Image (tube, rainbow, N blue to C red):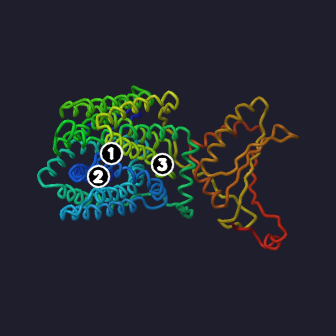
Amino acid sequence: MIDEKPDSEGVSALAPFRHGIFRAVWSASLVSNFGGLIQGVGAAWMMTTIATSPYQVALVQASTTLPIMLFALVAGAIADSFDRRKVMLVAQTFMLVVSVLLTVFTYYNLLTPWTLLAFTFLIDSGTALNSPSWQASVGDMVPRNKVPAAVALNSMGFNLTRSVGPAIGGIIVAAAGAAAAFAANAVSYIGLIIVMARWKPDVPVSTLPRESLGAAMGAGLRYVAMSPNIGKVLVRGAAFGFSAGAVLALLPLVARDVVKGDALTYGIMLGSFGIGAVGGALISVRLRQLLSSETMVRCAFAGFAVCAFNAALSHHAWQTSLGLLVGGACWVIALSHFNVTVQMATPRWVVGRVLSVYQTATFGGIALGSWIWGVVADAHGAETALIAAAIAMLAGGAIGLVLPLPQQQVLNLDPLNRFKEPHLALDLKPRSGPIAIMIEYIIRHEDEAEFLATMAERGRIRRRDGARNWTLARDLENPSIWIEHYHTPTWLEYVRHNGRITHADAMVGERLRALHSGDEPPRVRRVIERPTTAGTALVMAKGPIEH
């Protein structure tokens, strides 16, 4: 029997384990994470033995995060457009093949600093493809009200492995060499591939044609751009990644040069970071009950700054490891909070793309920071780079004075599914267009201020979900009449736009209908715009134009 404690929403922190597929994927991921961390220790320590400068050592961390920054948006569009299970299978198989090749190259002494960076880049390119599908699939494994608990458990699982995986990796590298660490990582993918191959998710099948990759990416970027709260999370995530990434990027140098240790010392330090991260995952639910989102994130920035200062000033492995306990806890508290905030503010149709944009911002910050702090360490030493990064962390926390994070809200972002295609007198094709939509409201004078405020929210939602050229007009001869007007490029995009409306969005429409004072519901007119040049007259007479 699992001992469960309910969180603030009444959902047990361990409730996702009641779902068999989540349990199986979580367990297989635990093994795969072990392999990944062992591989990371092997790559970082291997670089310290073959690199010619601290700059190349820091680039190992950059090479693991740069692919996420570069490919996350494409991967997010793929996650929302294709079968996520199959996407994850392809990604895991690709990483298995690359890991085998890395093992062979290492065993036969063919590695150079740049080929090692290339292999780590390729492995993490697979991670970049896998990650949006994996994170978006959490909602396919558990009900929406259990998603925050599932995200926390995933974070806890990764950091459970981080607490002992690096030490095991250090032992393997010290005893058998980096090739053995890379081989262990290759084997670790097999269990997760088997679980994914056997999983048959019950995912609703869309009746609409799949969006092109470019259109899907554009829709994801538009959704993020028209969601101010998500934008705040992106800024804070990028700032956190840029500053906090310095500790992990420079830790191999700290272990080798500052505390005069070896691969095992490096593994133990990473293990301390992982133990702290497990503690952070355990207390994060309680912190969300006690603190506001902004206060919790500011504390994470400040705590990580303490960790960086300590790593710069300490010359004892045990003292550095104590600071890394704090850093690991702050790492998980901040990043898991960002992740949950994004997931709970995003509907299923676009969640993979929004998560990918969040990952691009955060891991892009880590990649950029790893490069910059590596340059600083190359010129002035790791201690100076860590002190500068700690100051940047304090500055990142201060951003909250200007861009405070919103409090988490539980919104019903399931699709409304209320829209039914109207009966049309014209035989439109899916690509017929452009389509113009006009909705006429009758508003009393005393309701105008509330109507305009509600319409501002309606306009944001319309544009976020794909409407173009949204405007609100007022009749000059009858000022009580207001007309909402927008376009979609085709009839298919109009249907797709209406299919994106969620229950939370519908509340705005209900407020508008309540303000409408006419005897009949607001009048909706849908028209297709037609060119008026003389050369098109014959075509227009034969039927609708397709673009």
* Residue at which label 1 appears: 154
Confirm or deny contact between disc 3 and disc 1 (CB under 8 A): no
At mark 2, the secondary structure is helix
* Residue at which label 2 appears: 29
The answer to which of 213 and 390 lies nearer the viewer is 390
| In this view, 286 is above or below 33 | above
| Spatial separation of the CA atoms under disc 3 and disc 1 | 20 Å
At mark 1, the secondary structure is helix
The answer to which of 154 and 149 lies nearer the viewer is 154
Residue lying furthest front in this view?
379
The answer to which of 164 and 546 lies nearer the viewer is 164
Identified by mark 2, the residue type is Ser
**Sequence-earlier tag: 3 or 2:** 2
Identified by mark 1, the residue type is Asn
In this rendering, the count of numbered labels is 3
At mark 3, the secondary structure is helix
Measuring from the top left, give residue 399's x and y in whole percent: 48, 31
Confirm or deny contact between disc 1 and disc 2 (CB under 8 A): yes
* Residue at which label 3 appears: 357
